[in-house]
């Protein structure tokens, strides 16, 4: 067998082990739970203000050749819905309940699994452009004519593609832990991710403790608290991401990182750009660059915080997001 073939097998084996023991560790608190998808659309009659992110039902909607799994909260609030776009290797259960419940206290919020992710059907997308197309399909299938977007990490890149493709569909955007096409270090996300997955494997910790948070005492404690919050939903949890879907997303990130920069001066919508000051996954220099490229942006940088700055500082982020969306 050729050397490159051996390396490929070793890499695949390592990936399988580390995916099984780190990326999915948030489901450990619900090991006996069977992922369940509800088959009725959400209406005002079957969602109550008492619903929270840990209890709100998962539903499905079919558009084209994809059946999307999604959850929504705060429908009774009316106004422009906020559609959440998730990060690398994430499913519905990876959203911080404090952020979801906090935004849903004032707004109608919707989060979904893109094609081939979690409980959604289809083959996973391997480009930001396709992820954006699928998100647009989902939004229109929900009968929405205008939305706000909240994209974290890879989701922030998808948000940029959406607003460039269909600007009339977007009122405002919040993008966190993300950067522009061709941004510094974005094409190397796979290397950082695999390294921290291995660190998680050999230390018995979730990789997100390393990927999302600094190694200072404050960052470590914030990471532990965040990971505990992700376990709060104990019933009807989402399906975990597959290895093939994870690899497709890494390819999308690699290509995005090597893509020529695009003209973001055409984005006239208000955009809140947020990150920690020590992001290792999508280096914080990209956050400053992105804010400068967007003509109507507001920038927030959290101190002693990494990629998951909005999770570490959720107590500050939620009011800031609400104020931005409410203007």
Image (tube, helix red, strand yellow):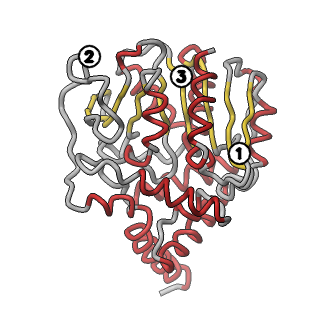
- Left or right: where does residue 193 sit relative to residue 292? left
Q: Position of residue 317 (x, y in %)?
A: 61, 36
Residue hosting label 2? 44
**Placement of 145 over or under 185, stated as above or below:** above
Secondary structure of the residue carrying tag 3 is strand
Residue hosting label 1? 302
- Left or right: where does residue 212 sit relative to residue 205? right
Residue located 70% across and 22% down the image: 267
- Crowdedness of circle 1 by 10 Å Cα count: few (<14), some, many (20+)? some
Residue located 34% across and 34% down the image: 52
Say whether marks 3 and 2 touch (CB < 8 Å): no
Q: Quadrant of residue 161?
A: top right
**Placement of 50 over or under 30, stated as above or below:** above
Of circles 2 and 1, the one toward us is 1
As drawn, the label of residue 148 is: 3
Residue located 31% across and 23% down the image: 49
- Crowdedness of circle 2 by 10 Å Cα count: few (<14), some, many (20+)? few
- Crowdedness of circle 3 by 10 Å Cα count: few (<14), some, many (20+)? many
């Amino acid at each position: 067998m050729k050397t490159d073939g051996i390396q490929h097998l070793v890499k695949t084996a390592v990936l399988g082990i580390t995916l099984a023991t780190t990326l999915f560790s948030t489901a450990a608190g619900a090991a006996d739970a069977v992922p369940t998808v509800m088959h009725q659309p959400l209406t005002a009659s079957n969602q109550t203000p008492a619903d929270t992110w840990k209890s709100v039902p998962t539903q499905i909607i079919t558009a084209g050749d994809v059946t999307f799994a999604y959850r929504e909260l705060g429908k009774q609030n009316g106004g422009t819905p906020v559609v959440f776009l998730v990060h690398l290797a994430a499913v519905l259960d990876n959203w911080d309940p404090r952020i979801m419940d906090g935004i849903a206290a004032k707004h109608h919020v919707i989060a979904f699994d893109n094609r081939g992710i979690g409980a959604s059907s289809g083959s996973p997308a391997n480009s930001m452009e396709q992820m954006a197309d699928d998100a647009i399909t989902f939004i229109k299938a929900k009968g929405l004519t205008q939305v706000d977007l909240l994209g974290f990490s890879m989701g922030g890149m998808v948000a940029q593609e959406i607003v460039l493709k269909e600007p009339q569909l977007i009122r405002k955007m919040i993008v966190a832990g993300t950067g522009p096409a061709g941004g510094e270090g974005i094409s190397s996300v796979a290397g950082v991710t695999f390294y921290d997955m291995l660190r998680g494997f050999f230390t018995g910790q979730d990789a997100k403790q390393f990927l999302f948070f600094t190694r200072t005492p404050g960052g470590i404690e914030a990471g532990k608290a965040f990971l505990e919050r992700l376990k709060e939903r104990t019933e009807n949890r989402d399906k975990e991401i597959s290895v093939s879907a994870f690899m497709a997303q890494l390819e999308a990130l690699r290509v995005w990182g090597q893509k020529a920069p695009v003209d973001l001066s055409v984005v006239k919508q208000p955009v809140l750009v947020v990150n920690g000051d020590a992001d290792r996954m999508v280096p914080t220099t990209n956050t400053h660059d992105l804010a400068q490229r967007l003509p109507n942006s507001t920038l927030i940088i959290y101190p002693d915080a990494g990629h998951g700055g909005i999770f570490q500082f959720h107590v500050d982020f939620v009011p800031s997001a609400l104020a931005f969306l409410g203007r």
